[in-house]
Image: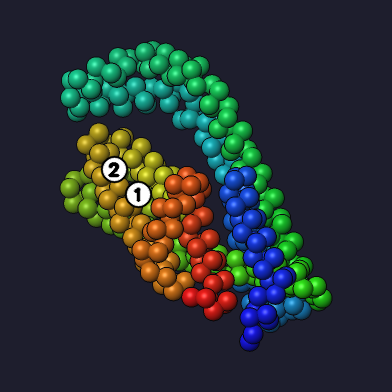
Amino acid sequence: MSDSQKYNFPQVASYVLAAAALLLILQAGLLAALYSGLLVYALVHLIAPALSSRMSNQRARLISVAVLGSVIVLLLTMGVWMPLAFFLSDDGSYPVLLKKMADLLELSRHQIPDWLAEYLPDSAEALQHTLTSWMREHAGQAKHIGEQTGRTIAHLIIGMVIGAMAALYDTTQLHHFLPLASALHQRVVNLHLAFRQIVFAQVQIAAINALLTGVFLSVILPLAGIHLPFVKTLILITFVAGLLPVIGNLISNTAIVVISLSHSISTAGLALVFLVTVHKLEYFLNAKIVGTKINARAWEILSAMLLMESLFGVAGVIAAPVFYAYIKSELTQAELV
């Protein structure tokens, strides 16, 4: 194949447009929409072949999209309804929660140094005053977080809809692309394949993370005479949240530390040390597993994560494995690496 055939104008233009699109997605905060769309797109391609053996190809994909949409709506509904149901119940009411927090502080006061205990509220009334003052001082930040959460949920839903529509169009229509459109379509296909590789790798990482956490919660702590409640639920949360890079660890760690606090400050501290150690090691495990999937060395993935974090923050860390896998696949196809 000659250079003119390998690097024609539509091909080069598609690379430039793909790079610009990925940078724009990071700058505009649309990574959640991109990932949710790619996830639905990948799942449709994964589920539809299993159904197409019993029915027509187009009908199989329509059913797979309908099933995925129903499951997603159900999960979102449960995610909204369960916290609301808890806070509207007697156990979740503000006075009961305030009393539980006050009891926890009183228990903790005898387990921490005197110089630190001086900074803790003396009673439930003092705790309520502290919380109220904090909420007033940070009302603007809380409003911003609420708005950002709403935007992220909207981006997730819109991304899912776009991914489902793209999967249906891509698999049920005959394509007659012009040169630039054909090259851009290939860029999307390569990004989708890179995303699938990373997602399957992330499932392995989440399973290993949940296994280690399960050993800690159900074996190590009981051997030390510590029995925490909701152990099975915490292990499930660790696995599900572990499917989300970086932010998933924060969710599961917070849940485990809060439950550990119900036992004692020392237990919470022990849990925190364990979780930090595991998740620091997980960075290297992540790089190893992901590197195997995309034929890259661990130091390559870690370097990409470090560079992306310095440029784009947490979003860069989440984007780095997929973006690097995509770039690596494009360079390999172009026979440059």
Please report whichever mark, 2 or 1, sits nearer to the chain's N-terminal start.
Answer: 1
- Residue at image point 27% right, 22% down: 106
Of the pair 1 and 256, the residue shown nearer to us: 1
Give left or right: position of 5 versus 298.
Answer: right
Whether residue 207 appears in this view of the structure is: no
Q: Looking at the image, is mark 2 or mark 1 nearer the viewer?
A: 2
Where is residue 223 drawn, in percent x and y? Answer: 18, 51
- Residue at image point 61% right, 55% down: 22
Question: Mark 2 = which residue?
Answer: 272
Of the pair 46 and 189, the residue shown nearer to us: 189
- Residue at image point 44% right, 58% down: 304
Q: Quadrant of residue 134?
A: top left
Give left or right: position of 292 versus 198.
Answer: left
Q: Is residue 262 above or below residue 135?
A: below
SS for callout 1? helix
SS for callout 2? helix
Of the pair 239 and 188, the residue shown nearer to us: 188
Q: Quadrant of residue 201?
A: bottom left
Where is residue 200 drawn, in percent x and y? Answer: 49, 67
Q: Residues within 10 Å of mark 2 (few under 14, many from 20)?
A: some
Residues under labels 2 and 1: Cα distance?
16 Å
Whether residue 331 appears in this view of the structure is: yes
Q: Is residue 220 above or below residue 182?
A: above
Question: Mark 1 = which residue?
Answer: 231
Residue 330, labelled with which disc? Answer: none
Where is residue 307 drawn, in percent x and y? Answer: 44, 53
Q: Given the image, on which type of amino acid does mark 1 rest?
A: Val
Give left or right: position of 209 versus 113.
Answer: right
Q: Given the image, on which type of amino acid does mark 2 rest?
A: Leu
Of the pair 182 and 54, the residue shown nearer to us: 182
Where is residue 102 drawn, in percent x and y? Answer: 34, 22
Q: Quadrant of residue 225?
A: top left
